[in-house]
Image (cartoon, grey):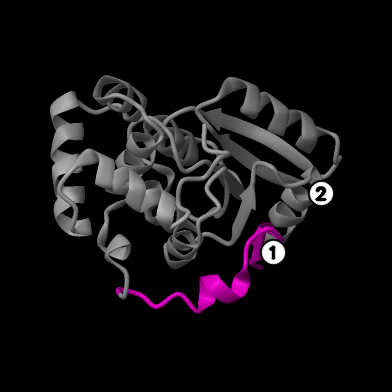
């Protein structure tokens, strides 16, 4: 039996994942978490083989947690709405063995868990492997952004207010303002509107992001 920890901040998503996995007869959900702090606590106290990890959670992002989770032993499969190759590449660099999109069929999720439990890699068929593996590290200013800056950028570009971004990510409004200022500097733009247009042009504004 493959033991799985489900980490996602949406209760309905967690319930759906548990239902899908419970029907396999070979995978059991041994724990769940809705934010970064709970993920690490569950991983420490609940032995598991695979962690299903969302990227955009309150507090620390899934990508921020990846190195610590991998150091603890379990394999990690990222389950997210983010399809941008920069996220996929970063997740793989940090040790994830699987990357599945929330719009993918449930069979892909099960296959990813099986592969990860055996130390093998599985990527969503919706993702271009050629673009992920050919991605030149450091050639794009976007590559220099921290995981938190990327989250702030995505939610800002989707029209979220300062207070909404702060509440969702579990940081202060002042912290969001600081991240936005650094983003403008790193990406070479001067206004909020330019920041949004930049995201749209590079197709990093994922319509499935919630």
Start and end of the magenta stretch? Answer: 116-138
Give the residue drawn at x 78%, y 43%: 106
Q: Is residue 48 above or below residue 59?
A: below
Residue 111 in picture, x, y percent from top left:
77, 55
Give the residue drawn at x 46%, y 46%: 205
Residue under label 1:
118
Give the residue drawn at x 47%, y 43%: 55
Look at the magenta stretch and give its main secondary structure: loop
Classed neighbour count for the residue bearing mark 1: other residues with Cα under 10 Å, few (<14), some (14–19), many (≥20): some
Classed neighbour count for the residue bearing mark 2: other residues with Cα under 10 Å, few (<14), some (14–19), many (≥20): few
Relative to 199, is 171 on the left or the right? left
Relative to 116, is 44 on the left or the right? left
Residue 83 in picture, x, y percent from top left:
55, 53
Which mark is on residue 33?
Answer: none
Q: Is residue 134 magenta?
A: yes
Foreground residue among 168 and 50: 168
């Amino acid at each position: 039996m493959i033991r799985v920890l489900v980490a996602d901040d949406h209760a309905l998503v967690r319930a759906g994942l548990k239902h899908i996995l419970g029907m396999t007869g070979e995978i059991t959900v041994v724990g769940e978490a809705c934010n970064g702090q709970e993920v690490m606590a569950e991983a420490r106290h609940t032995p598991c083989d695979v962690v299903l990890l969302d990227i955009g959670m309150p507090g620390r992002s899934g990508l921020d947690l990846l190195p610590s989770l991998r150091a603890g032993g379990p394999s990690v499969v990222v389950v997210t709405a983010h399809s941008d190759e920069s996220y996929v590449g970063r997740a793989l660099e940090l040790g994830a063995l699987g990357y599945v999109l929330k719009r993918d069929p449930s069979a892909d999720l099960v296959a990813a868990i099986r592969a990860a439990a055996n130390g093998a890699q599985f990527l969503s068929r919706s993702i271009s492997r050629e673009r992920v593996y050919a991605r030149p590290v450091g050639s794009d200013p976007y590559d220099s952004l921290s995981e938190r800056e990327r989250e702030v950028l995505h939610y800002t570009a989707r029209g979220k207010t300062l207070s909404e971004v702060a509440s969702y990510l579990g940081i202060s409004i002042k912290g969001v303002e600081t991240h936005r200022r650094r983003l403008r500097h790193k990406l070479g733009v001067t206004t909020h509107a330019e920041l949004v247009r930049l995201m749209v042009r590079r197709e990093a504004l994922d319509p499935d992001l919630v």
